Image (cartoon, helix red, strand yellow):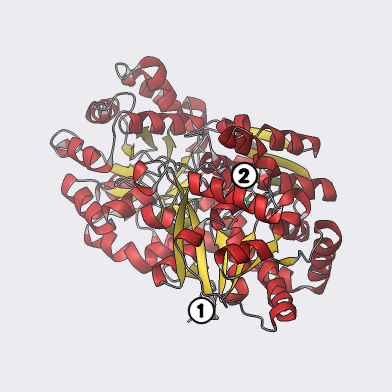
Amino acid sequence: MNRIQEKLNEDKKLLSIYFTAGYPEINDTVSIIESLEEAGVDMIEVGLPFSDPLADGPTIQESSTAALHNGMHTELLFEQLRDIRKTVNIPLIVMGYFNPMLQYGVEAFCKKCHEIGIDGIIMPDLPLDVFQEEYEAIYKKYGLINVFLITPQTSEERIREIDEVSDGFIYMVSSASTTGAKSGFGDEQKAYFDRIASLNLKNPQIVGFGISNSNTFQAATEKAKGAIIGSAFIKYLTQNGTENIQSFVENILD
Amino acid sequence: MSYHANEKGYYGEFGGAFIPEMLYPNCEELRQNYLKIMAEPSFTEEFHQLLKDYVGRPTPLYFAERLSEKYQTKIYLKREDLCHTGAHKVNNTIGQILMAKKLGKNRIIAETGAGQHGVATATVCALMGIECVVYMGEIDIARQAPNVARMKMLGAEVRAAKSGSRTLKDATNEAIRDWINNPVDTHYIIGSVVGPHPYPDMVARFQSVISEEIKWQLKEKEGRENPDYVVACVGGGSNAAGAYFHYLDEPKVGIIAVEAAGKGIDTGESAATSALGKVGIIHGSKTLLMQTQDGQITEPYSISAGLDYPGVGPMHAHLFRSGRGEFISITDDEAMTAGLEVSQLEGIIPAIETSHAFAIFDYKKFEKEDVVVINLSGRGDKDLQTYIDYFKL
Ligand SMILES: Cc1ncc(COP(=O)(O)O)c(C=O)c1O
């Protein structure tokens, strides 16, 4: 069983953290991952920076630009992560945009992830139909879980289709927005969370976008299996550096 | 074999919709409806009425006698520069604003580089009384001040794209992000045959009025519908798509696409996507684009803001790869010289984008009897400052 699936079987709400590899400093990748695990985070999304991150708001855009400026690139990220499984046990997911993966070669990329011990991939701009037609078999061959997104606008029919193709969790985007754009959840989100919960999907859902503190974490995980924090963590790194990651996580889980 | 899009929006291996799920409902709504709406009599009637009475169509097909004499071939100019707002861009914005109305949208967003598409969008929004937000790179705002003022005067809000390289590609990113944040009430009017399916096909269809007219106009003048060559400059490729559209599947009509080489293909300051690009994903479309080995999209360069785009529409990527189209790249200097020449031989000051198309004669020789149609995509008013600076006028 894949580490993601094992983690999803644990009887607790999961906290997943996204960060952009190569930010704030080029060689922070491994220490950030280790600190997050130590602090009690359940899962990590390692962001492979892209020049044109369409689905991201200013915070992640800026961290991506800075990371690229620092010299981050696909091969370097893989090198940095080469020995990560000697020290880290929680699931690791690579998140990015499809073009860098396509240039690396989809099969080569998956093979490398497998060798390192990456458990899953999130490529928001790799569409469902193309994934199924061209890449699903490759992901399977290397034991990688592909994570799809749904939004409040996604039709039930499509959610069921996505549920069928998924074999880990569904990334539930909390509102119609880019990352970091909205904070706090209103009635609309609550209704959406309830609606999705009532669908009884086979894959658990993890909520992302708009989660920044313990309150929003609680609200997001009332029905869902877990929540993902991205922009708020990046902001924290920008302000505080990598020294005190523990306290950021404590504040959320508190 | 057809060079048009198939039902999934692919031109050969190029096209498709590589979009995050947040955009799926928006694009899907459009995909399911665009052909149906475009076939509705009430739509076509209003579209053609506006093209006639508001845009000023049909635009003339003009035999350029002195230019023909100089290059010893028969050169016709398709006068898109005479369209209202000064370029072909308005053919598409008229079509898309009517589409937006049919879809019940009450807010329009657009991206713009030089400001031509922004002005054409602001214009149709004023015409229809619909709210309009135009994203424009911070750098372009500074260098295209007159068009920024025109958009404002037309009632549009111009928002500066401050991310990335702060030019057209980033303005497009910002418009897409706006659409993600406003999925229900907003329609995104893309300015060229780029972006996710169905945009390339929809925009090509709206621009296809160009070749539709060329056909009957040429029949009147030359007794035949088909020229030997159609020539157009390619930024994203919308004026070219319109000029080629009804000739794509006529193998006897040569298709010539002219790209901006900037300071030269090997200088690192160029926008010649067919020469420098590799297959990848940009703005939701699989196409040729300029990128690093690592798949990061790079910044193009051209003296003409309208050709300063690191990708090219999937139709053109396919025309290039399949060999159906002949691609020529023209430097800043060659384009500027050609623009001056057309001004003085024909009394027409072309947009600098279009000037690139007039510079092909050193690279491509035509027979004396050949009929060559050059799509004169826009007029040079907007570029006067660049011409002034370049020629020290
Ligand atoms: C006059 C003119 N021609 C050509 C272009 C390039 O766009 P496209 O390749 O979509 O026709 C522009 C874009 O601003 C333009 O203003």
* Kind of residue at disc 2: Glu
Residue B347 visible: yes
* Kind of residue at disc 1: Ser
Label 1: few (<14), some (14–19) or many (≥20) C-alpha neighbours in 10 Å: few
Residue B197: quarter of image: bottom right
Residue B31 visible: no
Number of marks in picture = 2
Work out whether residue A209 or residue B31 is closer to the camera in this orientation and state it: B31
Label 1, label 2: how far apart the Cα atoms are: 30 Å
Q: Residue at x 65, y 56 (%)?
A: B377
Q: Secondary structure at mark 2?
A: strand
Work out whether residue B270 or residue B45 is closer to the camera in this orientation and state it: B270
Q: Check the image and report above or below for B384 versus B370.
A: above
Q: Residue at x 76, y 56 (%)?
A: B83
The chain holding disc 1 is B
Give the labeled residue for mark 1. Answer: B2
Residue B204 in the image: state x and y as whole percent.
62, 65
Look at the numbered discs 1 and 2 and tell me whether their residues touch, using CB distance below 8 Å. Answer: no
Q: Residue at x 46, y 41 (%)?
A: B301
Residue B105 in the image: state x and y as whole percent.
74, 52
Q: Farthest residue toward the bottom?
A: B223
Give the labeled residue for mark 2. Answer: B111
Label 2: few (<14), some (14–19) or many (≥20) C-alpha neighbours in 10 Å: many
Q: Which mark is residue B135?
A: none
Of the two numbered discs 1 and 2 on the same chain, state the one appearing first in sequence. 1
Q: Secondary structure at mark 1?
A: loop
Residue A26 in the image: state x and y as whole percent.
27, 27
